[in-house]
């Protein structure tokens, strides 16, 4: 009654139902899967799990209801040990076969899989003990059965064979013997996978009680944990796939377009990157996180300062994955506030100085001399000002911007960037020197307030780093968490108070909108009256919810299309679509500059009693930053903040005696486990995920591929319900794809009707073309005509789409619109020129 999966050579089930469930969950979505039934000698083969399952129910249903002999489900082509074991299916020798399989493959399973379980399971020791107990009972069961078999065949087996068979049970080794404790588990992982241990760096001392209520005290060091940058880079670059991607060098976009950091003016004129384009481009991000209940009594005690880094050399389609974001520093925020952030920056500076001059690191291609420098420092305004040496609370500074020397009065009336005096690094250093040389504390305090800066310390000593130009504004914090909720709130307040719309109709529009399958998870919350009437400028929506709300708001306010206040929001949506675009042309950047000027002028005209906030002023600098560092999405903080979720999840599984040490150890084990296999890396995992499969009309697929792609040789093909490719999910009969450009500047969209996987390598989308009527400036979406169901379909290679984003439609007043996430004009220009 034992069934084994020969695909993974690990899973063993006591019933056929469990084996089928395992194959469905673990193997059915593999594009190159092939089943040979093998039950009762059946030789039928299958490429789709559902077909195999129904075959078992039709032909071998009795095995689903009652016990069977030892069987094995094996895909065609299985060789090696599993093939030898399959020959031992007579009575007692089958038990020997299963024991050999368990003993050999269970150890291999620990090596490749358990390392991930160790950091995900709250108490791995309990799991290990449970597995050991089950394993012991299983061995005892096999021992008893073997004795019964040998007694029945005593006349045909020699004493030596019986002795050798029973010796298998005595020599069986427990694969968990050396990892029975947490310390041994962590030690084994660190040794096997080259874990980079964090340095404990003391920054002060404090007096603590030995026990709660005790009168005895001891001195305790205050520490922060720093993951050595050079060792972390060496571990990251030691993987062949990572090194292969970075070693290929930067991809420069066509002249006149901005696609990545390399297309910005900063890297083109940088002392290091202009001479060595393959040098590592470090992007640092810093933020504080609360790992406890923010409303609880321990909220402020366990607030942590996190510093992450990633590499701008990573292809943008992989850079948003959490595997590309690595931990650099973790510390208690309270300790850093007392000792100052300079203690962290000095340690980072040591590694940055060495990297800028060149260090020899062991990569996947042998020892290489690696160069690198910091490209940008990302974070919210508070974090960037703290690390760059500006006033953290801009409300108390005369100059409220780190890019220019604007005063509050000028901010209210001037909406052109060139009307403000720009800050420069040289002037910034000179102002810091004036503060340091001030004779009195009063003069020093006044200079800090006037210049809007704090003493500099080690902050500008990073090699070839400009704190003015390389601390870009973050569109998530500036727009999605600042400008957008405040302006929408003011506009809705005015419309409701003037009687042009009611709050109930707004909430009904939000609730009743037909959201796409991807937008449902970020569906905006309804707006309560108390939220609308509060003075905090917030709508109680997350950044993701604000993005969706901006996309649907023109449909909610459709009746007030020509209202000046609604047009203010429409213009803001246009700005958001441009700053979130992955490709921008110089012409679009110039248009963005004019749009921001007009938007701020309209804001002041419509709301003369409302002040222009610092975040609204920061928008004036976005066009200049795009020219310097490329599109804003390349250094946006949204994906960095997703990394926080990992540490918050781990925090619920550890004790808080030394929370920083516990978290950094878990993280380092997690990062080291990413290098388990040289042929795969977490960064490239799930590039292509498939939904449930089904069989297709092979003649139809061959005809379509020949007509549209020129393919004549097609051996096999399956259809899937959905396809996830590089973070974009295509769903049959729901997703729209941008397939080509028509009439010079108009996108043609198509509704996905089928998704085919051909010969396990080619991923094709069969779509029904929609005619694009125009771009609607009110809905900020493309109006399309829905074709009749009888119209012919076309097919396209999913990897050769004009734009890989999955789009969805919305309908109103008998018209259908394709909602866009960002400005497509420059995507079209880049494709057609």
Image (cartoon, rainbow, N blue to C red):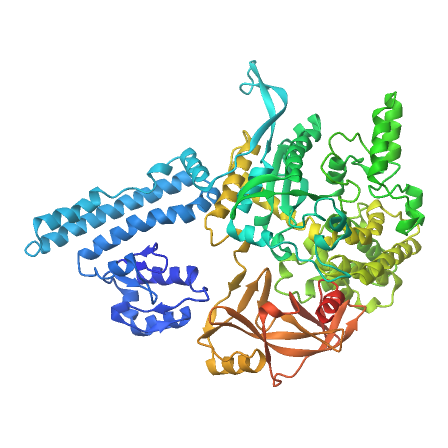
Q: In this rendering, would 506 be left or right of 355?
A: right
Residue at figure coordinates x 90%, y 50% from the top left:
418
26 or 340, which is in the foreground?
Answer: 340
Q: Position of residue 565 (x, y in %)?
A: 87, 60
482 or 365, which is in the foreground?
Answer: 365
User: Which quadrant is the N terminus positioned in?
Assistant: bottom left
Q: Position of residue 313 (x, y in %)?
A: 64, 51
What is the residue that sits farthest to the bottom in this orientation?
A: 790
Residue at figure coordinates x 62%, y 78% from the top left:
768
Q: Position of residue 807 (x, y in %)?
A: 66, 67
User: Which quadrant is the C terminus positioned in?
Assistant: bottom right
Q: In this rendering, would 456 be left or right of 27?
A: right
Residue 298 appears in the picture as rendered: no
Residue at figure coordinates x 42%, y 59% from the top left:
26
Q: Vertically, is 658 above or below 98?
A: above
Q: In this rendering, would 669 be left or right of 448?
A: left
Residue at figure coordinates x 50%, y 66% from the top left:
691
Q: In this rendering, would 132 be left or right of 378?
A: left
809 or 85, which is in the foreground?
Answer: 85
Q: Position of residue 448 (x, y in %)?
A: 85, 31
């Amino acid at each position: 009654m034992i069934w084994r999966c020969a695909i993974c050579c690990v899973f063993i089930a006591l019933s056929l139902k469990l084996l089928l469930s395992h194959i469905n969950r673990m193997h059915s979505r593999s594009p190159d899967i092939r089943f040979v039934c093998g039950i009762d000698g059946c030789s039928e083969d299958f490429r789709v799990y559902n077909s195999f399952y129904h075959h078992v129910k039709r032909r071998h249903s009795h095995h689903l209801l009652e016990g069977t002999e030892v069987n094995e489900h094996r895909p065609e082509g299985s060789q090696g040990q599993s093939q030898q074991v399959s020959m031992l299916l007579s009575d007692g020798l089958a038990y020997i076969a299963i024991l050999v399989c368990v003993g050999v493959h269970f150890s291999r399973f620990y090596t490749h899989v358990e390392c991930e379980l160790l950091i995900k399971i709250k108490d791995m020791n309990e799991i290990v003990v449970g597995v050991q107990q089950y394993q012991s009972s299983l061995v005892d069961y096999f021992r008893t059965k073997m004795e019964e078999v040998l007694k029945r065949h005593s006349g045909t087996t020699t004493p030596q064979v019986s002795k050798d068979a029973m010796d298998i049970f005595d020599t069986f080794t427990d694969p968990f013997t050396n990892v029975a404790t947490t310390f041994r588990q962590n030690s084994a992982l660190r040794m096997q996978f080259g874990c980079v241990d964090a340095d404990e760096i003391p920054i002060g001392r404090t007096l603590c009680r030995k026990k709660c209520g005790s009168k005895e005290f001891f001195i305790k060091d205050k520490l922060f944990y720093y993951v050595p940058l050079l060792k972390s880079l060496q571990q990251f670059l030691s993987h062949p796939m990572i090194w292969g991607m970075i070693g290929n060098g930067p991809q420069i976009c066509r002249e006149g377009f901005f696609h990545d950091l390399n297309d910005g003016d900063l890297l083109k004129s940088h002392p290091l990157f202009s001479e060595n384009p393959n040098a590592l481009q470090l992007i640092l991000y810093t933020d504080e996180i609360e790992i406890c209940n923010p409303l609880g009594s321990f909220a402020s005690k366990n607030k942590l300062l996190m510093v992450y880094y990633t590499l701008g050399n990573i292809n943008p389609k992989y850079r948003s994955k959490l595997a590309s974001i690595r931990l650099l520093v973790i510390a208690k925020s309270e300790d850093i506030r007392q000792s100052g952030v300079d203690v962290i920056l000095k340690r980072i500076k040591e590694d940055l100085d060495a990297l800028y001059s060149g260090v020899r690191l062991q990569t996947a291609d042998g020892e290489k001399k690696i160069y690198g420098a910091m490209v940008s420092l990302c974070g919210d305004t508070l974090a960037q000002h703290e690390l760059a040496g500006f006033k953290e609370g801009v409300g108390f500074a005369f100059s409220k911007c780190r890019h220019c020397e604007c005063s509050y009065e000028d901010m209210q009336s001037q909406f052109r960037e060139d009307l403000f005096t720009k800050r420069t690094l040289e002037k910034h250093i000179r102002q810091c020197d004036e503060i340091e040389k001030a004779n009195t504390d009063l003069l020093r305090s006044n200079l800090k307030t006037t210049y809007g800066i704090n003493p500099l310390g080690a902050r500008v000593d990073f090699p070839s780093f400009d704190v003015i130009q390389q601390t870009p504004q973050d569109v998530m914090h500036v727009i999605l968490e600042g400008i957008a909720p405040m302006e929408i709130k003011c506009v809705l307040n005015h419309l409701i108070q003037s009687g042009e719309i009611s709050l109930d109709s707004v909430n009904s529009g939000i609730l009743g909108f037909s959201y796409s399958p991807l937008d449902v998870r970020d569906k905006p919350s309804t707006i309560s009256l108390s939220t609308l009437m509060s003075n905090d400028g917030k709508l109680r929506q997350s950044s993701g919810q604000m993005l969706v709300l901006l996309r649907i708001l023109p449909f909610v306010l459709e009746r007030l299309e020509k209202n000046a206040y609604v047009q203010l929001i429409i213009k803001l949506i246009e700005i958001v679509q441009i700053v979130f675009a992955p490709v921008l042309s110089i012409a679009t950047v110039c248009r963005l500059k004019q749009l921001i000027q007009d938007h701020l002028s309209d804001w002041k005209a419509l709301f003369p009693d409302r002040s222009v906030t610092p975040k609204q002023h920061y928008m004036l600098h976005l066009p200049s930053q795009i020219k310097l560092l490329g599109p804003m999405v390349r250094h946006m903080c949204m994906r960095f903040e997703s990394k926080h979720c990992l540490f918050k999840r781990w925090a619920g599984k550890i004790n808080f005696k030394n929370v920083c040490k516990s978290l950094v150890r878990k993280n380092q084990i997690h990062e080291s486990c990413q290098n388990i296999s040289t042929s795969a890396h977490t960064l490239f995992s799930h590039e292509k995920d498939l939904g449930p499969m089904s069989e297709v009309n092979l003649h139809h697929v061959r005809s379509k591929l020949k007509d549209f792609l020129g393919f004549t040789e097609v051996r096999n093909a399956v259809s899937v319900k959905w396809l996830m490719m590089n973070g974009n999910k295509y769903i049959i009969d729901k997703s729209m794809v941008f397939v080509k450009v028509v009439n010079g500047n108009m996108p043609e969209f198509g509704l996905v009707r089928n998704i085919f996987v051909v010969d396990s390598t080619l991923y094709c989308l069969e779509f029904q073309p929609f005619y694009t009527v125009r771009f609607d400036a009110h809905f900020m979406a493309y109006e399309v005509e829905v074709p009749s169901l009888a119209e012919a379909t076309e097919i396209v290679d999913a990897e050769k789409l004009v734009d890989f984003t999955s789009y969805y439609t919305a309908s109103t007043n008998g018209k259908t619109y394709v909602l866009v996430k960002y400005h497509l004009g420059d995507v079209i220009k880049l494709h057609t020129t």
